Image (spheres, rainbow, N blue to C red):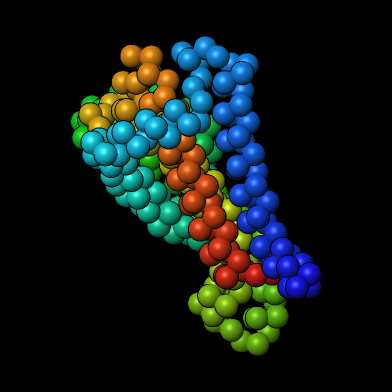
Amino acid sequence: SKGNASFLYSEYRQRIRGVLSVIGGFTLWEILARTVLTNRLVIVPFSTVLDTMWSLARTGELWKNIYVSLVEFVLGFALAAVVGIFLGFLTGTSTRVREYLEPLVSALYATPLVALIPFYILVFGIQLASKVALVFTIAVLPIMINTQAGILSVERNFLEVASSFRASRLQIFFKVQIPAAIPFIISGVRLGVGRALTGVVVGELFFATAGLGFMISIASQTFDTARVLLGVFIFSLAGVFAIGLLQNIERRMAPWRLS
């Protein structure tokens, strides 16, 4: 019925609009590549990218590159999330630790860490460890800074009320500060996802023997635009999936944030 359709639309409105936006973008890409931007060294139609994806998937080359990039991302990002949240809690609850670490964190956050690639190669070589270290370094700071901001954003009234009921420091931390910080933590992790994917691409462009970034690098040298755009497309899909997953986590853990 019309009422049920209206209810379903309102319930899944965000997802429906997101899907329509993606379909519209791919359709516009296909039309422009076939009618306006016809130079195949610059752009190819989206259908050509899909054909290339199918060909590489059948040979197994695509899966190998996806697996390498996925391992680098998961290891580096997971380590960054754990360390970043821990340091954020530490600096948010301890003034002394925050005063010691804040200048260092500010300096590192402002430093173009990509410029340290020769250092990563020298210390870790060109194997997995170097890419994981790069992803970790790039992703950890926004997670830490947002977690710290979440802890510091807790209203003093809440802390005073908890103290008046004789709550211990651990109870205040787990019952007041962490719930208040969850939206900030999720935001930091979402920023970290984008930076981690950037770290994977940069690492594989400069020092790798496999991975999607390596595929993009080789394809750009041979002017294989379809493979270049395929790599970018897969990284974009990974980002969309990761952000959507984090939004679902936030919706469950902090429903008041999205209400």
Q: Give the residue displayed 42% in from the left and 20% down from the top.
A: 225
Looking at the picture, tell me which residue is in the foreground, 34 or 172. 34
Q: Give the residue displayed 50% in from the left and 30% down from the top.
A: 46
Question: Can I make out residue 32 in this image?
Answer: yes
Of the 4 image quadrants, the one containing the N terminus is: bottom right
Q: Residue furthest front?
A: 1
> Residue 32 placed where, x, y %?
61, 23
- Is 258 situated left or right of 62 in this image? right
> Residue 194 placed where, x, y %?
50, 42
**For residue 64, which quarter of the picture?**
top left
- Is 235 situated left or right of 146 in this image? left
Looking at the picture, tell me which residue is in the foreground, 103 or 142. 142
- Where 1 falls versus 29 (above or below)? below
> Residue 53 placed where, x, y %?
37, 35
- Is 124 situated left or right of 195 in this image? left
Q: Give the residue displayed 60% in from the left and 66% down from the top.
A: 251
Q: Give the residue displayed 34% in from the left and 21% down from the top.
A: 219
**For residue 252, which quarter of the picture?**
bottom right
- Where 33 falls versus 65 (above or below)? above
Of the 4 image quadrants, the one containing the C terminus is: bottom right
> Residue 41 placed where, x, y %?
46, 13
